[in-house]
Amino acid sequence: MIQVKFFASLRERIGTAERTIPAGNTLTVGDVWSAVADFPMPSNLLVAINHDYVGRDHAVNDGDEVAFFPPVTGG
């Protein structure tokens, strides 16, 4: 199983803070997004697997935690 977490405005738009999906044969971050969201992955989205930032083509394995973050600005 893959634990998927959503933060900030993504959590509000998707309607939940986390979901669990079954692990497939060869999943990428993009595949995980497609399984949990009903809109295209924003191009500026930040993604972490097991607390390490990765790209959207990064492989996702059974037991991983995938976290999606909207871009953050500070002042």
Image (cartoon, grey):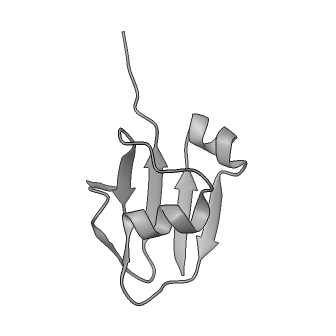
Quarter residue 8 falls in? top right
* Image point (40%, 63%), residue name: 30
Using the image, determine if residue 1 lies above or below residue 52. below
In the rendering, at what x and y percent does residue 69 appear? 45, 43
The one nearer the camera, 39 or 3, is 39
* Image point (32%, 58%), residue name: 56
In the rendering, at what x and y percent does residue 5 appear? 55, 56
Q: In the displayed image of the protein, which residue is found farthest to the bottom?
A: 25
Quarter residue 54 falls in? bottom left
Residue 10 left/right relative to 70: right
Quarter residue 50 falls in? bottom left
* Image point (54%, 82%), residue name: 1
Residue 12 left/right relative to 67: right
Quadrant into which the C terminus falls? top left
The one nearer the camera, 19 or 40, is 40
In the rendering, at what x and y percent does residue 72 appear? 40, 27
The one nearer the camera, 11 or 64, is 11
The one nearer the camera, 14 or 18, is 14
Using the image, determine if residue 19 lies above or below residue 45. below
